[in-house]
Amino acid sequence: MRQQTFFSPTMRDVPADAEAISHQLMLRAGLMRQTAAGIYTYLPLGTRVLHKIQAIIREELNRAGAQELLMPAVQPAELWEESGRLEDYGPELMRLNDRHERRFVLGPTHEEVITSIVRDGIHSYKRLPINVYQIQTKYRDERRPRFGLLRGREFIMKDAYSFEPSEEALAETYEVMYETYMKIFRRCGLDFRAVEADAGAIGGSGGTHEFMALADIGEDTIAYSDRSGYAANIEIAAVRPPDDTEEGTSTALSEEKGFANGEAVATAAGQPTSAVITGRLFYIDEAPVLILTRGNHEISDVKIGNHFDTLDVEVATDAHVQERFGTSSAYIGPVKAPSSVKIVADQAIRPLVNAVCGGNQDEAFYVNVDHRRDFKVDAFADLRMIQEGDPSPDGEGTIQFAEGIEVGQVFSLGTKYSEALGAQFLDENGKSVPMQMGCYGIGISRTLAAVVEQHHDADGIIWPKALAPFDLHLLVINPKDEAQLTLGENLYEALQTEGYDVLYDDRKERAGVKFKDADLYGMPIRIAAGKKANEGIVEVKDRNTGEVTEVQAENLPAYLK
Ligand code: ATP
Ligand code: MG
Ligand code: MG
Ligand code: MG
């Protein structure tokens, strides 16, 4: 590709809201442009990397026996009514009507569509298991789209769904998909961990793991043992009862089970109009106060609202709380609550909210404030957030924290969707039973951003070989110099004949501009035809190590191998 006509506009001054380094670099290097909040256009450089990630995913999934298909982004709302998720999914679900006022959603995920198709197409155990996947654009009206491609409202996902004749078969496929994900993320050059996780809005009965690319910008926190292989999303690791040596009442443990079983609980401060919504409950001057805190996490965006209207509530960082509990905290004081309260829980406090409210809640959900209930407030007080340095859950080592970007997740769903949507089959005994299901997602556009988060320096991106938009970046330093231009043109042809994908900087720009752009783009190898072109010598730079070597042009193919 000749750079003269290659469409990759660089950007010098990135917008102030581009906080994440990957967001900044992808704008600066012209990989993408924002079209609307959380909605992006992928320019040719970005598209090339997406294709490379997709090729790796396709190769590994096909090898694992999965089959590619393609489902629609627009899905009838009735399907979502059948599964119960039209309501459950909440405001993240983008909804639209057609000209006949028929209701549709823009798919945030595809369990409903694929289950309805499999239910109509497979009726016997003889046709199971199957594992299908697609690479598709997904829509989620995220509360806070941010960090560029890391949290978009329109993004590219690979999602796979397996339908199994038995729990054992599901466990096998789950294992295969887990291993396949390990291979995919390794090939993408990511430093990542697989962690035990929470099933979130997908729900389901079985286990689930998330694949976390380690990066400070990550919105998830991983609790891992410094000695064993234990690693879990803090969402599930976070809440533990205090051990005997800690303060607190022991009666809480048995009571806690009630909550974990899904009983929705909100606490009232003695009066029907007042409620405090979950968390680590303390009494301050005899008034129950919910402490929403973990370490130094910022929790300013916690809101309590009535359905989609947000109520004004007191959310504050309180010196009084800090003094008393020795922690930087935000709290929601007693608030006036309507009969149904929406909780938008920050990642950092979601574990507490989940432990108290029961079940696996995603970011937003509703709790009925039932004023007639006996509030079991004492139980909350005994829950404690896990902290760095705690012993671990598997008895080895101590807990450490790391921030991670969730690039993928595998779920063992069980029969949640097959039962709701009636995906039954006749088993070997001729009995009609629901299929066991698994689902498996990879955020492809998010993976692209995560790779940039991990692979860059002050000058720009440093692509891992497997994902680089071009293998080689060839520069002619001064195209007006005949020897340089001839060498450049010859090498451009020769290297492509060797099978390399070459970006060829034939622009009439100053040397400084060319070198700067080359560093910003971050191709693994830069080859410059400059002053020594008349001796047939080029300068080869390794973007990763910075090492520069002079190589005789005719030796270049051998040198690069
Ligand atoms: P998160 O916890 O970050 O909101 P999720 O758990 O809701 O993600 P899943 O339903 O597990 O996401 O979807 C599968 C994958 O899709 C995720 O592991 C992630 O890589 C990707 N993904 C999810 N939401 C987004 C988004 N808003 N922008 C980009 N990628 C996303
Ligand atoms: Mg989400
Ligand atoms: Mg998640
Ligand atoms: Mg997930």
Image: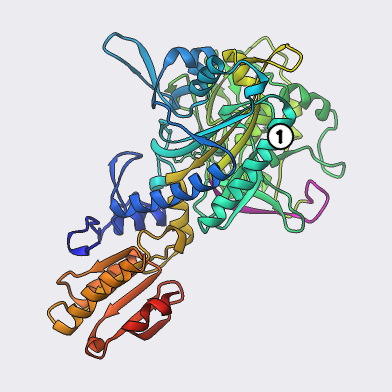
Which residue is at a point 28% across and 74% down the rendered structure image?
515
Q: Position of residue 131 (x, y in %)?
A: 58, 32
Which residue is at a point 70% across and 42% down the rendered structure image?
237
Question: Which residue is labeled 1 in the image?
Answer: 171
Q: Position of residue 363 (x, y in %)?
A: 53, 31
Is the residue 344 above or below the residue 422 in the image?
A: below
Is the residue 49 above or below the residue 442 in the image?
A: below
Relative side of 223 to 133, left or right: right
Q: Is residue 551 rendered magenta in the image? A: no
Q: Amino acid at mark 1?
A: Ala
Magenta stretch, residue numbers = 391-406
In the structure shown, which secondary structural element does the residue marked by tag 1 occupy?
Answer: helix
Relative side of 91 to 83, left or right: left
Is the residue 411 above or below the residue 318 in the image?
A: above
The answer to whether residue 160 is visible is: yes
Q: Position of residue 20 (x, y in %)?
A: 41, 53
Residue 33 or residue 522, whichever sits in front: 522
Is the residue 280 above or below the residue 84 in the image?
A: below
